[in-house]
Amino acid sequence: MKHICSIINCKKMKAIRLYNRGATLVILFSLALFASCGKDDEPENPAVNPVEGLKKIHEFADDSYIVTAWNETGEFRLGYTKVYFTVQDKDGKYIDNAQLTAFPEMDMGMMKHSTPRSEITKVPDKPLYEAYYNFLMYSGQGDGVWYYDLAYTVGSASGIFEDEVIDVKNAFRPDGRTQITIIKTVVGTDDKRYVLTLVEPLHPKVGVNDITVYIHKSQSPEFPPIEGGLILKLDPRMPSMENHSSPNNVDLTWNAAEKIYKGKVNFSMTGYWKLNLILQDASGNIVYGNPVVPQGEQGAEASSLFFEVEF
């Protein structure tokens, strides 16, 4: 009888062990399934594309690195052109610790000149570098050809691309034929040579818009920026609508935070606008430009200093 009980107890113990082992396997399988599902459900974190939404302008390549210029239009253009650069090794890896310098120059045969521009600086938190160029002329204008020198340094490696021909496009009004005035070189009453470049509004709209302008001094071969000390009086007009203006415009003054001359322009309707300007010094003396005179009165109907916007 004891032997029988012992056999029964042994079978019970085996059954319990098998049950426990089975339960353990079920639990482990469930956990594995849960972990697997959780992993599949988690969104992957793909590599960020630093040039998403940008178009390639020009590529510079040697045996070690590829430097590519990008922007929203895929073009260098007359006037203000914002440019971004990427640096990649031959495996396609983006380099975020490079140093870049560049020098654009137009060869017109009898003479050469550069253009107002910024240094190339690193974009925070991206393997991307940025600069702007205010091209004074477009390619072919006066039979001129734009050349571009670009140098890079990555760690102990360095390289230079010299005399790369670049194509600077002309800038047109919406009709695609009439050139638009977005950059102006003038000689002031102080005998200094100034280059003024319209930056904003890039995408004008009806209502109040930011208006920003770079002012550089022309002292070949460099064009140092003039940071403060000047005022741009603003008087926007619509020539096709009896040269009427608009309210709530704000003259352009130096904005130290953004390092540009900034004001407000109010477009009361769509169409073609002349942004008449008068360049003044800090004391209010006119350096260049003149007030707008209404139609029918003797004198000019526009300032000698203006930009054009049409939308």
Image: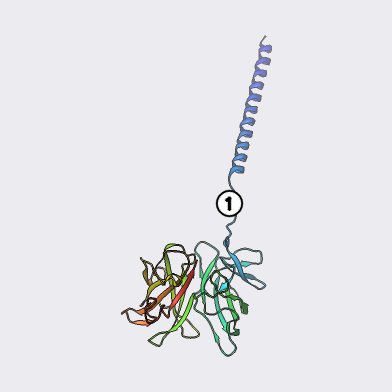
Residue closer to the observer: 138 or 88: 138
Task: List x then y, in percent, for residue 94.
Answer: 60, 64
Residue closer to the observer: 219 or 308: 308
Q: Which residue is mark 1?
A: 45
Residue drawn at (51%, 61%) of the image = 125
Residue closer to the observer: 252 or 103: 252
Task: List x then y, in percent, for residue 223.
Answer: 47, 81
Residue lying farthest to the top in this orientation: 1
Residue drawn at (63%, 36%) of the image = 33
Residue lying farthest to the bottom in this orientation: 110
Residue lying farthest to the front in this orientation: 296
| Occupied quadrant, residue 24 | top right
The N terminus - image quarter: top right
Residue lying farthest to the left in this orientation: 283
Colouring mode (rainbow / by chain / secondary structure / one colour): rainbow
Question: Helix, strand or loop at disc 1?
Answer: loop
Task: List x then y, in percent, for residue 90.
Answer: 66, 67
Task: List x then y, in percent, for residue 212.
Answer: 43, 70
Number of other residues with Cα within 10 Å of mark 1, as a class: few under 14, some 14 to 19, many 20 or more:
few
User: What amino acid is at disc 1?
Assistant: Asn
The image shows residue 22, relative to residue 211, as above or below, that is above
Residue 284 showing in the rendered view: yes
Residue 260 showing in the rendered view: no
